Amino acid sequence: MAGYPEAHPGLPTPTPLADDGRGTGWTSNVARSRNTGDLIFQSLTGLGAVVVVAVVGAILLLLLWKSMPSIQRFGLGFITSSDWDPLHERFGAWPSIYGTLVTTAIAMLLAVPLSLVTALFLVDLSPPWLSRIVGTGLELLAAVPSIIYGMWGMTVFASFMQRWIEPGLAGTLGFLPLFQGQMNGMGMLTAGLILALMILPYICAVSRDVFRMTPGVLKESAYGMGATTWEVTRDVTIPYGMRGILGAVFLGLARAIGETMAVTFVIGDNRHVAASLFASGNTISSTLANQFNEATGIKYSVLVELGLVLFLITVAFEIFAHLWLRRLRNAGGR
Amino acid sequence: MAATVTISPQTLRPLAETMRPRSMAWRRGVDLLVRVIASLSACVGLIALTWILLTVCIRGGAAISWTFLTQLPTPPGVSGGGVSNAIVGTCLMTLLAGLAGIPLGLLAGVYLAEYGKNSAVASAVRFAANILMGTPSILIGVFINVLLVSPPIGLGHYSGYAGAAALAIIVLPVVARTSEDMLRLVPDTLRESALALGCPRWRMTLDIIFRAARGGLLTGVILAIARVSGETAPLLFTALNSEYSVRSLDEQTANLTVFIANKGPSPYADWQQMAWGASLLITLGVLSLILIARFTLRERKS
């Protein structure tokens, strides 16, 4: 600051502001605030950043610490065991992991194609005004609290499943063990379908952004060659956005895998692993929601370990999704 | 570039092998078919939204009355119960979560956008924020239960403060990431002009950059609040629920979402109806916040 007037010898020297009693002129004010005000502010913002990292670390450490008794007692066999016997203190995670995987798989199988087609519709096919309406609708669908999906799923959607979808599936695909058995509207299929609805807006929003990254010039040149809208979509937009879509899919997956209330309401809390998708089951999060509050002793530790398993799965998916999306962005920026 | 390119049937051959020549009518037909399929799948989301909202409005609307908004819950079979305590509890915990989570999130966002930028520390913070955003909310509940509710670290009893803490942890990364994005949209020339006038960096950030990014910051904050006010899972193991009015947040605290989770699956028709009433309140609250956020952002843009 002191060197400023000398650096511009041809210009008139700036005169410091008059002393108004609150300071000793502008240069010294700046110098002082650089030392104190800026330092305090920067430390405060650093504190905010540290809290974010500390919370993640604390979650991992506390979950690990509380699940130690269970880890020591059951070891790796915890993952594959189907026991759930609080009386004799024998516990296994397999039915919960199985239910989590099955419901998530159903959700992904339905939501991924549906949201990709919807995203293409929003980017390429629909007029802007319609695009805005559908976009707002999907935004609201994403915002509906999960407990509301649960209430709706339990009362309205479950009976719809029981009356229409499940008999329909049993009638056409009933030779498969997946679609046999009692049809009461509650179970893994219903949970998977509701999950599909819940993650649809998320996958759709990310893949819409990915598709929008397609350079206009590429599309215009294809249109200029006389291609139809679908041909432009198939040969330009989809190949261009293909890699980004995987990132979107993994974000949706991470969301589906930990969803709690909606699943808890419709899955029927059953610890028996059944081949049929009509059968009731449980997921890691629904088991936590149903049992954590009453748990004491080793069962508390078992449930925390279940939570730890879920945390590690979601972290793995998050890492993968973000690495993938970042790689894509770097490639696109070149 | 200057070389002349002669287009002969031979040069077009490879292209012709990948794209079989079709009649225009066929191509138009396929195009139309795809349009129809895409429009139908775009409708799936809208139909589901309408179905859910109609269900909530019809069933919930039947429960809403002055008594419902002002009275305490009653046992099954006793008429005239309400959810006044749950409304107060949800509002208080959301408010407290916002008071804790929003300033911290803004600070973290300022750090990322103004100080950390592309440093290794900043990418670690950004990564942690992403992990935290992706963490299932029920695990936040388990975490706060271990930290604040269950002995030996915790106090040994459920409390509204614990519920607010769990919600604050959900608010924090959302506000941090959206505020970073919004602050980064402010052009660097504004920063440079402020600094060139001798403005210290903290004044520059608070007076110039925050003012320029006001709309976006507000949107991020509203979205974060909307998201937590409908959360159930993080409150299950922290605030739990209560049949009594809220006297202190140092005890089990009534709230709308856990109220729905408790009463909705019960076998009593009047409790179910109250759960639907509470569902309508929470849905209206969350969706109107989302719409407000959307329109503040659009207003800023135009």
Image (cartoon, coloured by chain):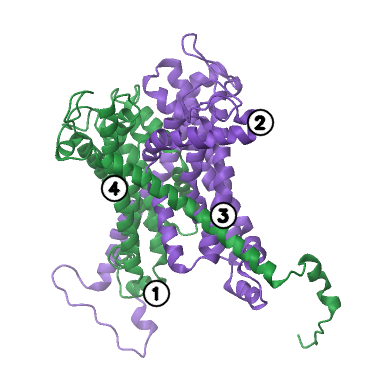
Chain colours: A purple, B green
Residue that sits furthest to the top in the current view:
A88
Closer to viewer: mark 4 or mark 1? 4
> So how many labels did they put on this image?
4
Distance Cα–Cα, label 4 vs label 3? 29 Å
Subunit bearing disc 4: B
> As shown in the figure, which amino acid type bears the numbered disc 1?
Thr
> As shown in the figure, which amino acid type bears the numbered disc 4?
Leu
Subunit bearing disc 1: B
Distance Cα–Cα, label 4 vs label 1? 42 Å
* Residue linked to disc 3: A116
Mark 3 residue crowding within 10 angstroms, few (<14) / some (14–19) / many (20+): many
Which label sits on residue B189? 1
Distance Cα–Cα, label 4 vs label 2? 43 Å
Mark 4 residue crowding within 10 angstroms, few (<14) / some (14–19) / many (20+): some
Which label sits on residue A176? 2
Give the image location of residue A151, x and y in percent.
37, 36
* Residue linked to disc 4: B284
Q: Residue B7 versus residue B158: which sits nearer the camera? A: B7
Q: Residue A234 versus residue A321: which sits nearer the camera? A: A234
Give the image location of residue B43, x and y in percent.
48, 54
In the image, are marks 1 and 2 on the same chain? no
**Is residue B290 shown above or below A212?**
above
